[in-house]
Image (cartoon, grey):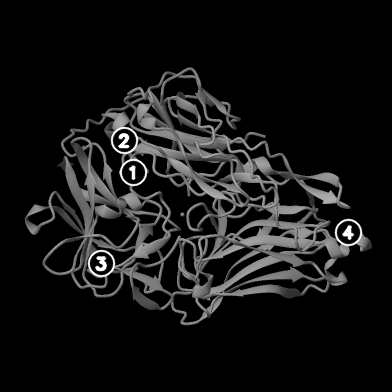
Amino acid sequence: MRLFLYISSIFLSGLVFGQFTVLPIEQNNAGNMRKADTTYTDTLYTLQLPFWEDFSTSGTTPDSMKWAIGDNVYVNATIAKNPPTYKAATFDGLKRNGAAYDLSSEYNGPADSLISHYIDLSQVSQFNKNSVYLSFFWQAGGNGEMPDTNDSLRVQFYRADSTWVTQWVQIGGSENSFDRFRQVILPVSGDEYFHFQFRIKFEGFNSLRGPFDTWHIDYIYLNENRDASDTSYFDRGLTGSQSPLFGKFYQMPADHFFTNPMSHVGKQNVQAYNLDSKTAVGHPLEYYYQLKNLTTNELYDFADMGNGGLGGLKPREIRTVYGPDTSKFNIPINKLDSQVIEATFYYLTNDKHLFEEVNGSDTVFLPVDLKVNDTIKTKFTLQDTYAYDDGTAEFAVAINQLKGEVAIRYVIEEMDTLTAIDIYFPDIAPESEGASVDLLIWDELNDNHIMSRAAFTIPPTTGINKFSRVTLSKPLLVKDTIYVGYQQFTDNYIGVGFDRNNPAASSEIFTRISDNWEQNNRLSGAIMIRPVFGTDTSAVIVLKVDLPVVDYNPYPNPNRGVLYISETYQTIGIYNLSGQLQYASETKPYHDISFLNDGVYIMRINDGKTTYSGKLIVRKE
């Protein structure tokens, strides 16, 4: 067997590349902001000290209220290892849309950059100018690919003469391979920086051919009244990403789950982190876990976990914390096709605001809310798909063998109709767009048990972690164990997304490059290939019937969190603009959609005969 990790332009025995999201916790915009004078620019803001960012309230891109440039930087909870708080900013060779900067480039160059809005340093007194410092945490590689000595990460400051000056550079290399983030603190030194248009820039220099040479940044803090030793923070929080909710699966079909829900849930985990290094006795650890069905509004359980039986957190300690055994919860069975279950970890830190000591005694509380990183909420979908992966690729696996085959094993809960395959082909070098593969389904791994074979031409990448869906020409009725995969017809590398956050799925990977199939014992994670189930309509006779058009009058629209529907109906589904189901329910007096982020959604309301589609605007303020 030959599976490989693609490292810059060299193939090494192992794996291939890196980039994905659980859903963010509640949004919280910066409060210390005023609009910049429009005589300078209409697109930049002027921020006041302190400037603080831990990315925990960002989506998949940095907060545009703090960062003027940074759309190509990927904010996520899975690629960095042990970040100080929930989510980190990842720098690599991919743009926001999932395309490489330059697939043909043989040279490294500037790729992702993160540039702040203006930060007004003109108000800093002459006496305090020697106390302004920028600190941040950084990591090379993490769960992504390690930068080599041709790669670098740098920090620059913006002077009053409109030039950027480099303050710090980190060169890649194996000596940077470690699981913890390191912290840097830099003085803002020189009168040329104390103007009202000061800015900070983080920039990665690496391969432009895909998600290689990965750097991560977290917990950025700029303020006065600091010194070079000010690297401890009275801040405790949660970090990492939640483990799968449904046993080995992040997603599974709703009717499969409710066949025996208690057999598909178990203990979840995240990590707790203590950023304080000064308090020698550590800090208390008290956390809670909640499991709730957002579709039916059923609270399955709320559990006080105490400290997990392991005492408080020591200085700078990071610890894995577990939820309860959810297999003992009371999960009522229902018949809805699409549902969203939300798991929440909440760390009761009683953290309030970042504070500083002035003149060694007076305590000043700063307008930075430290509670924002105490909660991790993750939504898990029950719809039509089995998924071992969490939707985010840290790497890509590839097999460089003519007629080589890859198969993923799925043990399904009940007999069902297999209608499609989802597979993620990331944009990496060597480019696989236009290459042809055969997508295969087996009930046993031998040539006499191939249930379906379909030729598929790999399309252009449509975005980071965007799956291609291949609909079967004839739906298959399947049961028990199936294998879903592909065969390639080139000895070039065809990369498929690989999620490193689910090691339990490793044993479900099989490969064949000659006569015999081999079970994976080298890669730790999940290949992003998913079976999709649905109703077989091939034998349904469709009658043309003229039906009246019904205006269901869903209101209010725009909506602040509670939705009403005036006419009789059976079901409602609310989708984001990418077509992903966010909420589904049968008829009820009203629908609580307060968990939806502000934005535009598509409603589909059905009365059993017709389906109404319309836009829904969610605007809570």
Hey, what amino acid is under mark 3? Ser
Which residue is situated farthest in the bottom direction here?
106
At x 59%, y 50%, the residue is 85
Q: CA distance from mark 3 to mark 4?
A: 61 Å
Hey, what amino acid is under mark 4? Val
State the image quarter where residue 371 is shown.
top right
Helix, strand or loop for disc 2 = helix
Residue mark closest to the camera, 3 vs 1: 1
Circle 2 sits on which residue? 264
Label 3 neighbourhood size at 10 Å, few (<14), some (14-19), many (20+)?
Answer: some
Relative vertical location of residue 188 with respect to residue 412 in this rendering, above or below: below
Circle 3 sits on which residue? 436
Cβ–Cβ under 8 Å for marks 1 and 2? yes
Circle 4 sits on which residue? 124
Q: CA distance from mark 1 to mark 4?
A: 53 Å
Label 2 neighbourhood size at 10 Å, few (<14), some (14-19), many (20+)?
Answer: some
State the image quarter where residue 307 is shown.
top right
Circle 1 sits on which residue? 249
Cβ–Cβ under 8 Å for marks 1 and 4? no
